[in-house]
Amino acid sequence: MIHDALIGPFTEFEFMRRALAAVIALSLAGAPIGVFLMLRRMSLVGDAMAHAILPGAAVGFLLSGLNLFAMTAGGLIAGFAVAILAGVVARSTGLKEDASLATFYLASLALGVTIVSIKGTNIDLLHVLFGNILAMDDQTLLVVAFNATVTLLVLAVIYRPLVIESVDPLFLRTVSRAGGPAHLAFLALVVINLVNGFQALGTLLAVGLMILPAGIARFWSRDLTVMICIAVVAAALSGYAGLVLSFQTRVPSGPAIILVATGLYIVSVLFGRVGGIIRQMFPGRHLEA
Amino acid sequence: MAQLAFRNVTLGYDRHPAVHHLSGEVASGALVAVVGPNGAGKSTLLRGIVGILKPLGGSIHLGGLDARDIAYLPQSADIDRSFPISVFDFVGTGLWRATSLFGGIGKAARGKILRAIAAVGLNGFENRPIGTLSGGQMQRVLFARVLLQDARLIVLDEPFNAIDSKTTADLLALVKQWHGEGRTVLAALHDMETVRTHFSETLVLARGPVAWGPTSEVLTPENLMVAMRMCEAFDDSAAACAEDGRSRAA
């Protein structure tokens, strides 16, 4: 019975196996990015970027269908355009960068929805906004895996400057010029992973599989490496459990995955070893040192 | 021989000068205190020296040093201590030039890091996250990183702020050790007693130079009073600096 409920869907149906493989690839790449987004206090920037890249991804979608290469390229162009425009306006007018970004991402989101609405169907719009991981074909799965691989390789290259820039940016600027390129590469990885998440979770929830696992990890460890590992496991677990939930209850797959992650997050907020509410209420006897 | 030379340098932000028309030289191996009230431009000057800020006018010459030879200790407030990084890893960033993006931290490098941590009295703190340290302990960690950088020019931004006298004494001993080794040290400081006792040369700064020379001669009540009365004007409609115009014409 338990085997049928938890394992059965994956042994029986190929689309479920593909979905599971995709969600694991998304977790391996997206969760570490989410950890850095959170630690660099950019969680909401990630959310804003998810909306900002919609027009580019939508144009790619309309030109080539659900071709992740086209959507990634379009998303990258739109994402960087919005990031650069927001930065230019902020620096030339004194407007705060987050306010500037909010303006541009909203405009970008409206433009994206308009493009899809005019040229596509309502089904297309729903697909882009909410995704459908259960409809993933082999080619798309390969693109998701490719993007995840590229993400991990680039992250390995920029890991050190990214860490130092996060904790002590002035120091990094005195010893290296890697900070700027590392930040730009990181933004590119954010966009790549958001687009990667489109198919599975849609525009609105793509950032969820990045940020929620990072938030979960924050409550269990003070060590960056351990946090990244916990975030990956939490994301993969949410993906697996979300797929099972979706299969058994007909809840759409994207929301199911994010709801499971939210459940894990609530458990972490309550019982987390680092700053969890219960831990704070009942800390136990104080230590000797 | 000059390790550091300022040629009519102006440093600031968005065209507003924070340090205006500073000229002078720091000899190789000198131990220089930079003093002045809040907003005098001390941190700005130090950021200009280490290359974080580009001069709005004039130039800074590093006497043949490149970025590799400069160690910078920023103010603690510029560091995000909520970031989950251990004392060992944080101090280890001082080896950036040896390790860069991919260089491994081998046995020798680990030994160097552990010795630097021990030298600042933080034995046993290696695995502690920096967020759990006190202000004084964090300052010791920053000094350990400077030690590891093994630089010829050392620039310290308010290194003894809000730390107890024991920690200050320990860290001052390190500063004097660096001076004894022939390294050039510049430090922005607030405590005049520390400056009088330990620093042979002082620059009194108040957005522009007030006095610069042997500490016993320049650290006078008159100079400090002049510095206290510095102009803190910040005016978006101010005219372009006439002195810059003259120097360009010349």
Image (spheres, rainbow, N blue to C red):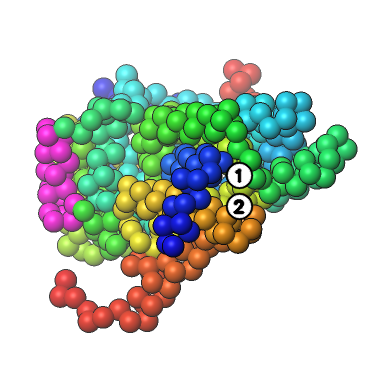
| Magenta-colored stretch includes residue B144 | no
Front residue of this view, candidates B145 and A265:
A265
Label 1: how many Cα within 10 Å (few below 14, some 14–19, many 20+): many
Task: Note whether residue A35 is visible.
Answer: no
Location of mark 2 (residue): A253
Figure quadrant of the C terminus of chain A = bottom left
Label 2: how many Cα within 10 Å (few below 14, some 14–19, many 20+): many
Residue B243's spot in the image, x, y percent? 60, 30
| Magenta-colored stretch includes residue B119 | yes
Q: Earlier in the sequence, mark 1 or mark 2?
A: 1
In the image, what residue occupies the spot 43% across and 73% down?
Answer: A270
Location of mark 1 (residue): A134
Task: Give the letter of the chain under mark 2.
Answer: A
In the image, what residue occupies the spot 58% across and 56% down?
Answer: A246
Rendered position, A270 above or below B67: below
Considering the numbered disc 2 on the image, is that residue within a helix, a strand or a loop?
helix
Residue A22's spot in the image, x, y percent? 51, 40
Residue B146 location, quadrant? top left
Considering the numbered disc 1 on the image, is that residue within a helix, a strand or a loop?
helix
Q: Which mark is residue A54?
A: none
Q: Amino acid at mark 1?
A: Leu
Question: Which residues lie in the magenta part?
Answer: B107-126
Contact check, label 1 and label 2, Cβ < 8 Å: yes
Rendered position, A243 above or below A145: below
| Main secondary structure found in the magenta portion | helix
Task: Give the letter of the chain under mark 1.
Answer: A
Determine the residue located farthest toward the right in the rendered image. Answer: A118
Residue A101's spot in the image, x, y percent? 68, 46
Mark 1 vs mark 2: tell me if same chain: yes
